Amino acid sequence: MSNPQTLFDKVWGAHVIHARPDGTDLLWVDRHFVHEGSHHAFRKLAARNMVLAEPGLTFGVTDHYAPTRGAPASDDIAGMIQTLKANAQTHGLEHFALGDPRQGIVHVIGPEQGLTLPGLVIVCGDSHTSTHGAFGSVAFGIGATDVAHVLATQTIWQRRPRAMRITVEGTLSPGVTAKDIALAWIAELGADGARGHAIEYAGSAIRALSMEGRLTLCNMSIEGGGRFGMIAPDEVTLDYVKGRPYAPGDWDRATAAWLALQSDADAAFAREVTLTATDIAPTLTWGTSPDQAVPITGHVPQDATRDVLDYMGLRIGDPLNGTPVDQVFIGSCTNARIEDLRAAAAVLRGRKARVPGLVSPGSSAIKRQAEEEGLDAVFVQAGLDWVASGCSMCVGMNGDLVAPGKRCASTTNRNFKGRQGPGARTHLMSPAMVAAAAVTGTLTDVRPLLEGRER
Amino acid sequence: MSAFPRLTASPARLPLDNVDTDQLIPARFMSRARSEGYGAVLLHDLRKKDPAARLPDGASILIAGRNFGCGSSREAAVYALFDFGIRVVLAPSFGDIFASNAVNNGVLPAVIPADRLARLEGEITVDLERVEITHSGGKIGFEIDPVWRTKLLNGWDDIDLTAQHAQAIASFKAAHHARAPWTRPMILG
Ligand code: SF4
């Protein structure tokens, strides 16, 4: 009998080219996504006169600087988009560029195109690469030096992280989503709670999540310090992959291999955490770190520090419920998939937003699908702006910014100071909760607004 | 990358926890080329509001708070520190991706518990070879992944190291694609 292995061990182990005695492994990379921010890495490659090792395994995505309304907002932004295009052409790699019907946010279109599959090693110069782990792949964010290394060699040196399992048992209550699970565990364990660990999410509540929900949960792993988040493949995974443009031709062989990717019953985890699904309420952040989150019925905690309170314009003991917001944002690789847009539209249908807001679908394909379903009309009739796909107001690189001092209810993943623009006050929450904030003009509990409505 | 030197200096302090990469370098500065220099935009927005984030010019050692460099994978956060002159960051813990990026750029992320950091006063000497810090009150150790230590001490570059494994990579690729053909995107045929 071989040693019991975790899901992570199995995928990692299948990619080790060389194990150095010092504990660092050289791993083969199956998929490498590059975006506009990868310009440093391409420059490093050029400086060494090197060519791209595996153009067929490298995919370019225009997302971080993508304009959501017409032309790029500045020459600088246009330049970033153009540089990626030029690099993609020079190195002969497939590029989901502006205007391509497949364009969208990297962590949305990888799965959507069937490029993200179970059992792969996937890297990208972006910390939310953990998203792709939702399929049972080892997916992680890397910096520019490592991006250059992958471009040059299609491999990466990594020390194996420790294994951690977050188990969520039970059934989520109505109005509670994968985003709430993520914010709940991060609030409990801290923004560095999973540092040094690869997380596997397990339990009946995880199994019950759609692929969209699983992507949201794995996406947020890095906000709890976990560079890796994974969920074992099952029928939900297979159903999602089937028929995607890049889904494998040898389907039966592939799926047999994928379904074997489960943690062995007696596999050891360095850390185990268990949550009960029914304990999780719609959750949102009040501060400037993702772990500063409470249920919507909660208050700004006693131990909140002066600088965070000043930045957020809140006082200790303030109830979150009823706090006025200035605007809303529905978008990002965390929560802008079709299911997220449907959840937001279910709250907004037939209602008016009291504050302005932006809805940016996670990909151009999702935008088209939402328009076929008439969701765009729901948003527009509510008074929100329906715009093109990109990272948009998640990071503001394309010029979509929250103004200084303005409070934004947002479906994104980071409430860091200045993340959505200098001085911007961000509250992270689920799409349904953001829709509820739009309707009432305040941070509010979505649950009463869902009564009598179809999800 | 050049080999890591033994360094003596008075550390600057940034006594805040969870200083994320968006603080270290706001997103709007990330389109610049490295040759333009990133030092001037280090902590650009934070230091305007928070006097604690104004680092003295010439600082080369930084004492920081818990979970330093959490957040994004943007290596520009390390460029900003490096171009400002920082070669060592001492903190109770680091964001995983940041720490790895730091080492790739010749910046030492040394882990030291907060109570010990509080006791460091005046000029200190950071000796990576011996994994110890000398200060007025004596010597203390720190934690660094031994692999990273070797890499920093030798100024190793991963691409050069990997070149020695070209043969192993080629055979792995062939075996991997034979064993799991589905790992290649269909477009390759
Ligand atoms: S949507 Fe936000 S978090 Fe996601 S890749 Fe873009 S900038 Fe990063």
Image (spheres, grey):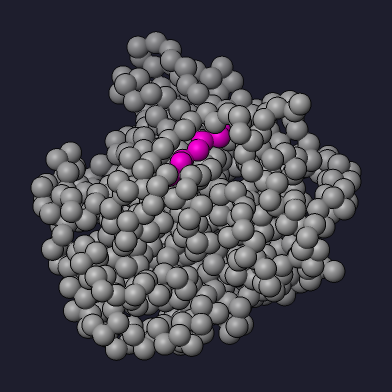
Question: What is the quadrant of residue A194 in the picture?
Answer: top left
Q: State the residue in front, A310 or A300.
A: A300
Q: State the residue in front, A142 or A2.
A: A2
On screen, residue A205 above or below A101: above
The x and y percentages for residue A174 are 32, 61
- Along the horizontal axis of the image, is A131 left or right of B188? left
Say whether residue A177 is magenta: no
Q: Is residue B138 visible?
A: yes
Q: Residue at x 51, y 52 (%)?
A: A207
Q: Is residue A37 visible?
A: no
The x and y percentages for residue A419 are 35, 60
Q: For the stretch drawn in magenta, what is the main secondary structure?
A: strand
Q: Quadrant of the N terminus of chain A?
A: top right
Question: What is the quadrant of residue A15 in the picture?
Answer: top right
Q: What stretch of residues is rendered in magenta?
A: A162-168
Q: Quadrant of the C terminus of chain A?
A: bottom left
Q: State the residue in front, A270 or A102.
A: A270
On screen, residue A219 above or below A26: below
Q: Residue at x 41, y 74 (%)?
A: A341
On screen, residue B110 above or below B132: below
Q: Residue at x 20, y 47 (%)?
A: A307
The x and y percentages for residue B70 are 42, 45
